[in-house]
Image (tube, coloured by chain):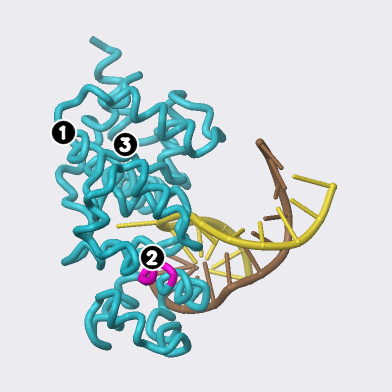
Chain colours: A cyan, B yellow, C brown
Amino acid sequence: MPFKLIHDLLFAEYGHQNWWPGETPFEIMAGAVLTQNTAWTNVEKAIGNLKARGGLEPDSLLRIPRHELAELIRPSGYYNVKAERLRNYCQWYLEGGGFDALDRLDTPVLREGLLSVKGIGPETADDILLYAFERPVFVIDAYTRRLFSRLDLIKGDEPYEDLRSTVESSLSDVPDRVALFNEYHALIVVHAKDFCRKRSRCGGCCLDGHCPVAAGLARISHG
DNA sequence: ACCCAGGGTCATA
DNA sequence: TATGACCATGGG
């Protein structure tokens, strides 16, 4: 399973992405909720509003009335459901004792805790685990399914946990898995945005034209 | 005007 | 288990 190879091709093309954008772990967590099915440019506006309102921290955020919180995050879309999801998350986060206490939990336990929050599904949980808690968890999103499916590494419609397990197993022996998974997911998203959508307009990883992944694979197979 | 975005929940079969 | 409706703004 050449998952490592695909990462290397993407990295050669796009370089370091230094994700996740955000100054604190909690800002990363809030961003993970706000970006659900939403363009990041919209999330930036919502985060800007939250910062201007009084600091992007769980306790200050919980003090904002529900309706006002929804107004602040309006640009990120789904603002009513996301306002509740943010509140749910903050309550779980504070009840769990904050970052240091939660960070002492083993990854599977912490993951179950995240998934117990209404509004935190598998992808958002893994975003938080990887980018805020720096755990070696591979994030599966729609881009990842499309890319690996186009490369015939997977079918594409497998359940989330099956894919996560497949990829994590095949990369279990690399030295720094946190750094690799961090970079890999970022590269897949950036490739989808910068090349597939903007340049190729293929709707995601068509491997046509000047696609760096297709070019790299062709280069290798030709000797 | 249409399509999609760094998803998840809930009802239904 | 697996679809479908629903949530909603903003950029291409």
Which comes sooner in the sequence, label 3 or label 1? 1
Q: Which residue is mark 3?
A: A210
Expressed as whole percent of the image width and height from the top left, the position of residue A219 reads 25, 20
Give the label, 2 or 3, closer to the camera.
2
**Where are the magenta residues, as a range?**
A88-92
Expressed as whole percent of the image width and height from the top left, the position of residue C12 reads 40, 63
Q: Main secondary structure of the magenta part?
A: helix
Whether labels 2 and 3 share one chain: yes
Q: Is residue A212 visible?
A: yes
Write the residue at 34% across / 49% down. A110
Q: Which residue is mark 1?
A: A176
Which comes sooner in the sequence, label 2 or label 3? 2
Q: Which residue is mark 2?
A: A92
As drawn, is A37 to the left or to the right of A60? right
Expressed as whole percent of the image width and height from the top left, the position of residue B3 reads 56, 57
Q: Is residue A90 one of those drawn in magenta?
A: yes
Q: Is residue A117 above or below residue A107?
A: below
Expressed as whole percent of the image width and height from the top left, the position of residue A17 reads 18, 49
The quarter of the picture where the N terminus of chain A appears is top left
Nearest the viewer among A187 and A95 is A95
In whole angstroms, how far apart are the C-alphas of marks 1 and 2?
30 Å
Quarter location, residue A222: top left
Write the residue at 42% across / 48% down. A112
In whole angstroms, how far apart are the C-alphas of marks 3 and 1?
30 Å
Q: Is residue C9 above or below residue A199?
A: below
Q: Is residue A31 visible?
A: no
Quarter location, residue A45: bottom left
Crowding at dot 1, Cα within 10 Å, few <14 / some 14-19 / many 20+, comes out as few
In whole angstroms, how far apart are the C-alphas of marks 2 and 3?
46 Å
Specify the amino acid type for callout 3. Answer: His
Give the label, 3 or 1, closer to the camera.
1
